[in-house]
Image (cartoon, rainbow, N blue to C red):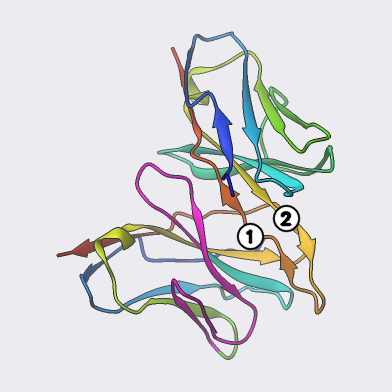
Amino acid sequence: KAGVTQTPRYLIKTRGQQVTLSCSPISGHRSVSWYQQTPGQGLQFLFEYFSETQRNKGNFPGRFSGRQFSNSRSEMNVSTLELGDSALYLCASSLARRLAGGDSYNEQFFGPGTRLTVL
Amino acid sequence: DAKTTQPNSMESNEEEPVHLPCNHSTISGTDYIHWYRQLPSQGPEYVIHGLTSNVNNRMASLAIAEDRKSSTLILHRATLRDAAVYYCILRDVDNTGKLIFGQGTTLQVKP
């Protein structure tokens, strides 16, 4: 089964521009989450989409937005890029299915990431 | 979200067992303990998770203290490929897509 794919893998932009990153989840997975990874802040949760609706949101400014399509593919957009937005952006997908007994089968499968450099 | 505390780094010799500790003194009754690891130049990958009982899978074992305020990830025989950053994460059963990563433990495996 194919894993989570992210495009593009590398991107160079300049300050003030905007960027759109794409994530294709594992087939059948309904939840897609986005994370930002930087050397200083580590891995930080951006947002999660489930059935085309944003279900959870991290503590990031409104310049960061996302959406999910009916086929579960997701995009995230960063507008008015700043130097500090340079990071590895990771996407993760999961089944997000609740099992009997309270446990939820929601192991996160991460993609390889998109390395964004803002000059 | 409840917080976890892990040592910044640990070293191990190849083919020896490794015990990676995690403290989570403010864990709530519905928090599951998850472990993920991130190999160099890769996205994180799931290792194991548990609620109250010890858990085993093909990758590792998870030992959970009786009061659930701490846990230990056990790699039975470390290999060079196990060198990674290991993250201990608490997740409420309802927060299905949101993982709050701490700084993790960087594990070095020496041949």
State the extent of the magenta-drawn residues as a range: B36-65
Query: What percent of the width, then of the height, locates residue A72?
Result: 76, 38
- Give the side of residue B73 with respect to residue A63, left or right: left
Query: What percent of the width, then of the height, locates residue B2?
Result: 64, 65
The answer to whether marks 2 and 1 mark residues whose Cβ atoms lie closer than 8 Å is yes
Q: Which mark is residue A95?
A: 2
Distance (Cα) linking label 2 and label 1:
8 Å
Query: What percent of the width, then of the height, locates residue B64?
Result: 54, 84
Question: Chain letter of disc 2?
Answer: A
Q: Residue, x 58% and y 15% (percent of image)?
A: A81
Q: Residue, x 27% and y 67% (percent of image)?
A: B79
Question: Chain letter of disc 1?
Answer: A
Looking at the rendered image, the quarter that the C terminus of chain A falls into is: top left
Tell me the SS state at disc 1.
loop
Whether residue B38 is in magenta: the answer is yes
Residue on which the image places disc 1? A107
- Give the side of residue A103 with respect to residue B14, left or right: right
Query: What percent of the width, then of the height, locates residue A86?
Result: 47, 25
Going from the N terminus, do you reach mark 2 or mark 1 first?
A: 2
> The residue under label 1 is which amino acid type?
Glu
> The residue under label 2 is which amino acid type?
Leu
Question: Residue A85, relative to residue B90: is it above or below?
Answer: above
